[in-house]
Image (cartoon, helix red, strand yellow):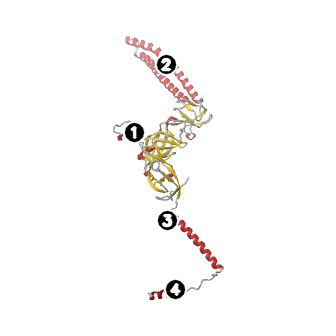
Amino acid sequence: MDEKAALLEQLRIDRPPPGPVRTSGGARRALIALGVAIVVLAAAAATWYRQVARGEAIPVHAASAQAVQSNAAGAPVAGSLLDASGYVVALREATVSAKSIYKVDEVLVQEGDQVRQDQVIARLDDTNTRAALEQAQAQVSQLQAALAAAKLAAADAQPTYQRDRAQLAEGLISQDAFDATKASYDAAQSAVAVAEQNLAVARASVVVAQRYEDDTVIRAPFAGMVTVKNAQPGEIVSPQFSGGGGIAQIVDMDSLEVDVDVSENFISRVHPKQPATITLDAYPDWHIPAEVIAIIPTADRSKATVQVRVGFKQRDARVLPEMGARVSFLEQAPVGDSPSGTAAATATTATPTVMVPPEAVQAGADPSAGSGAVFVLDGNTVSRRVVRLGVRTADGQAILSGLDPGERVAIGDFSKLHDGARVRVTQ
């Protein structure tokens, strides 16, 4: 023990007694700088501890998943498979023009006018066609008179022919005399036939001239609405100059439908007679019941889409051609799924679904898969959950599976949120 104590005594450092410490001005500034640095490092360490060691609360907004069974149109949102954008088009529309070059005398319609089938909408200058018609009618009168004269000459030649034939049989006249009479009779009969043919040609000319005259009166080919008026009195219209748009454009408003382009990745979800809803861009809160009319059997290679025709089940004057529209295709149970094969088998399914704000959904890496993710609030943390997406409407984003009604989801910066992140719900 004495040896160890001796060794410890050798390690002791002799210090002078404490006294007043004097520092120069440069040393004092160095000490101040050192203190500031220590304070900064301490603050940084505290920040790091809050963010990394403890996890800083990320501010988010909260939204509740609302249970829904149907949309505003009465169709189940739960069965929504996908949506697509397109435009309202008219299946039957026509640009009415003249058959030949004419000058417009008057136009009897304006844009927005409703017209009936065969209603007169314009009149063209008919001075030339009327003159041609009158000429053809005069030729008919002339040839009718010529035919009457030919028939009279044939009637006069018939008694002479019959008399000479009887005298030739009795030997009272020569054969040469009878032949001359017969030639005159045959010529009279031929003149009648030629006059009849000439009259028929003249009457046909009258029909042609009358049709040219009728072409100067422009009529509506079907009932509809005038959407464009292109001609004014005094202008020249012609089918060769189609760039002018003819006289007027008429649209059958009962033939309106929506044409949409559906991605090839989703076309397997669409089939004829499938229920759908149409939402017009002009009326985002108005959902119109619809039905798939047909799938055009060809694809657009440049856009990788297939065109689908969707028809309205309700007609409304607010629906206008060329309006932007969004179509939501709804799920439909196949007929084979019903043992009885009744109409109930084709009814849309009404499986439970929820609706959340679109900004609460993080799109998936593969859009064609129809999936996404939401961050579900659990106290002051969130958990990332993959969900199956339905249709997106003005009411929100439909979630077909993966989220229960009443659960709260976070709305915030997805780049900061992660599974297990601490959050702070703000108003």
Measure the C-alpha gap from mark 4 to mark 2. 163 Å
- For image coordinates 45% across by 19% down, the residue present is 189
Q: Which mark is residue 12?
A: 4
- For image coordinates 50% across by 53% down, the residue present is 410
x and y percent of residue 140 in the render?
Answer: 53, 23
Left-right relation of 129 to 73: right
Viewer-nearest of labels 3 and 2? 3
Q: Is residue 423 above or below residue 326?
A: below
Q: Which mark is residue 150?
A: 2
Q: Residues within 10 Å of mark 1 (few under 14, many from 20)?
A: some
Q: Badge 1 is on which residue? A: 346
Cβ atoms under marks 4 and 3 closer than 8 Å: no
Q: What amino acid is labelled 4 in the image?
A: Arg
x and y percent of residue 318 in the render?
Answer: 55, 37
Disc nearer the start of the sequence (1/4): 4
Residue 62 visible in this rendered orientation of the protein: yes
Quadrant for the N terminus, please: bottom left
Q: Which mark is residue 261?
A: none
Q: What amino acid is labelled 1 in the image?
A: Thr
Residue 365 visible in this rendered orientation of the protein: no
Disc nearer the start of the sequence (4/2): 4
x and y percent of residue 203 in the render?
Answer: 50, 24
Q: Which mark is residue 53?
A: 3
- For image coordinates 47% across by 36% down, the residue present is 313
Cβ atoms under marks 3 and 2 closer than 8 Å: no
Measure the C-alpha gap from mark 3 to mark 2. 123 Å
Disc nearer the start of the sequence (2/1): 2
Secondary element at image label 1: helix
Measure the C-alpha gap from mark 2 to mark 1. 78 Å
